[in-house]
Image (cartoon, rainbow, N blue to C red):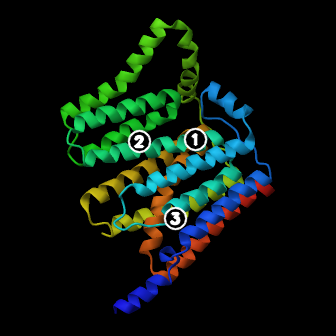
Amino acid sequence: MVSTYRTSSQRRIADGRYTAAVLFICSLIFWGAGALFGTDSSAVYVPAWASQWLSDGNSLLLRFAAMLFALLAALLMASYVILERRVSWQSCMLAFVAALVYNALPDASAFFSMLLPVALIGLLFRCDVSGDIARNLYALFAVAASLALLFPQLLILLPLMLLYPASSGKLSTRAFLATLLGVATPLWVVAALIYLFPSLAPLLDSPKKALAALWQVPSVALSPSMLLMLVAELVVALPAMIHFFVTGSIGRTHLRRRMIFCIVLDVVLWLAGWLRPELLVLFFVWRLPVFSLLAAYFFSALPPKISNVYIISSLLLWVASTIVGVWIV
């Protein structure tokens, strides 16, 4: 019985020895293909000064920097203990998908900002081992609010980050007040700096414009490439979520809580992208680290034959979306 199980496991791509290497090599090939075919980088979701810097920068250098940010986000996401067994190719899956998405939707600023929510997730998970939850939440929300001054879109994560300590019963009155103080601290610092140095006031124009854009009337207009990418994401993410909630494949309580938070984050970013179409691409890129987690969980949980067909079909769908985005649209 044991030997039969080992044999069937070795036949599954998700348990293969070279799966990570193949995905990583393919990601490098697609990053290089994007540079060869000259897909330009744009900057939409960053402050004006950063947008100008990205626009004036060398396209190959920006592509290399975006690749490094994507790889760093992949390594960070894979380092968090969420699944009960380590999946070696999880980070390579994110690198592979990020390379495909960048070639079809070459927005450098979205990939630069991808690292921010992943880092905040890691700081949030430290609450599990923190002896002083109030101090940990204060630091977390102070960092999040400071980053939100540069990327106002991160504001959507602030209420979500309260759900995780609340789900474990650690969100006491003292801890909640610490989160409010953490959010207020960078605002007080900025207000004091502007009061002392009025010439810094124009730096707030970009966050003001980003917040004002949230009140605009939304209108969804999807390209065929973007539509295929959303389908490729949903084909894996939705069955993975269903499988997680109908099975006990992750048995440890704190790991299930972490997985539930990641799923809630994915769903909220999905809905927010439809409600705010101008942020659809940004929130889509922010969901890719969670997608790599769901893929690592789901492909490893399926029977060998089904898993092989599923993973190959999924990867081909991602490749097709890139081909449509680069050569057809």
Residue drawn at x 42%, y 39% is: 157
Q: Which residue is mark 1?
A: 112
Q: Is residue 185 visible?
A: yes
Dot 2 corresponds to which residue?
120
Q: Position of residue 150 (x, y in %)?
A: 52, 28
Q: Marks 1/2: CA distance?
A: 14 Å
In primary-sequence order, the first of circles 1 and 2 is 1
Q: Quadrant of residue 25?
A: bottom right
Which label's residue is closer to the chain start, 1 or 3?
1
Residues at circles 1 and 3 in contact by the CB criterion of under 8 Å:
no
Identify which residue is drawn at 40% across, 17% down: 189
Picture coordinates of residue 278, whole percent (x, y): 61, 37
| Horizontal side of residue 263 vs 127, given as left or right | right
Q: Secondary structure at mark 3?
A: helix
The kind of residue tagged 1 is: Phe
Q: CA distance from mark 1 to mark 3?
A: 25 Å
- Indicate whether 177 appears above or below 38: above
**Residue 290 x %, y %:** 47, 54
User: Helix, strand or loop at disc 1?
Assistant: helix
Q: Which residue is mark 3?
A: 236
Q: Is residue 314 visible?
A: no
Q: Nearer the viewer, residue 260 or 194?
A: 194
Dot 2 or dot 3, earlier in sequence: 2
Residue sitting at 45 percent across and 7 percent down? Answer: 195
Q: Would you place residue 188 above or below residue 8 in this image?
A: above
On the picture, is 276 further left or further right than 124? right
